[in-house]
Amino acid sequence: MTGILIKELIARGDLQRCLIICLGNLVEQWQDELDQRFQLPFEVLTNDKLNAARGNWFLENDLVIARLDKLARDEEAQAKLLAPENRYDLVVIDEAHKCSASFFGGEVRYTKRYRLAKKVSGITRHLLLLTATPHNGKEDDFQLFLALLDQDRFEGHFHEGVHQVDVSDIMCRMVKEDLVTFDGKPLFPERIAETIQYKLSPEEMNLYEEVTRYVRQEFDRADALNDDQRAGTVGFALTILQRRLASSPEAIYQSLRRRRERLAERLRTLNQAKVRSLDRDDLEALEDAPEDELVQLEHEVLDQATAARTAAELEAEIKRLAELERLAERVRISGQDTKWRELSGRTL
């Protein structure tokens, strides 16, 4: 739909320069589909291109795709994007609900992505926000989101009778089930979801409960650090561990073993390895990062992030990890993987 809009505006002579901002894991899909379906040669912003440009890379390219997380965090890239001479006919922000803001304690909490969206709205004649989930159930937050399109109408707390609830003039809502082909047939096939019930073996259940108990204890210790960034980093590591636990016995065994070994190495060398700190914006951006970047960071953070403040606390955590590792190894050696057995026996 965005491609059709861009082609129409070009045909009318109303578009020469366009910027598409999307999630990191969708950049290549946007570029490929716009090229294959509409013959629109969009260039993807990268650090190498930005640094190699003789001048301002944004000024040298009329059709550009950029990563939301990169632009929101990279001050150098933002400075070049927001240069006074850089203007666009159309800016498109995909998954625009990521550019959220919310009221907290009577004040507005703006994310970096929201601030970016507000800035780019000032350098374009047209702003198009694409999202399937614009409303989170809080009318105040929804009004802040709409303020990206019309600040005069929607800025500030929502007040009945002051702010306008009817947004039909700026929002087009299309339901997937209502879309049909030219001959009236449903455009998308019906989706049928089935929940598969399974019961873990006693050994698997014991492993699950013990790792879950470890994760909860470490979450509590992280909360007690009074360091939001470090606590966020440890929390991210523990979330990864919990996800691996739900994956397979092999995955949780390997994760526990590697984490124990890396923390043991830190204890032996008294190495206070510097682990990348992750704030709230970082954690949200990671949800949409390309798979290779996410895997690399997961390895780094999962293996090294810890809430331990002393050598004794670190030694105690390593001992606990060794116990969990032995539990995981016993399940692994037994060959028990209930979830895989149930799934593999189903016909998709």
Image (cartoon, grey):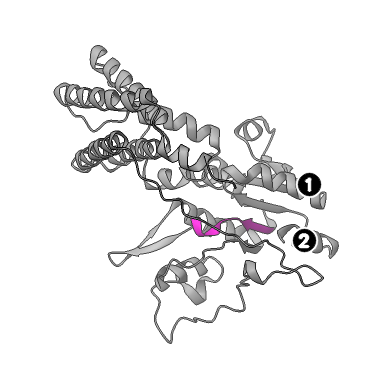
- In the rendered structure, the answer to whether residue 87 lies left or right of residue 300 reads right
Question: Which residue is most to the top?
Answer: 269
Residue 35 numbered mark, or none? 1
Specify the quadrant of the image occupied by residue 315. top left
Where 107 falls versus 270 (above or below)? below
Q: Residues within 10 Å of mark 2 (few under 14, many from 20)?
A: few
What is the x, y in percent for residue 210? 24, 36
Mark 2: secondary structure: helix
Please tell me which residue is depicted at 66% across the width and 46% down the height of the picture. 65
What residue would you read off at disc 2? 4
Please tell me which residue is depicted at 44% across the width and 84% down the height of the picture. 162
Where 111 falls versus 313 (above or below)? below
Inspect the image, locate mark 2, and give the three-letter code of the amino acid beneath it. Ile
> Which residue range is magenta in the image?
90-98
Question: Which residue is most to the left?
Answer: 312
Residue nearest the viewer, comparing 212 with 70 = 212
What is the x, y in percent for residue 273? 32, 22
Please tell me which residue is depicted at 39% across the width and 63% down the height of the picture. 102
- In the rendered structure, the answer to whether residue 317 lies left or right of residue 280 reads left
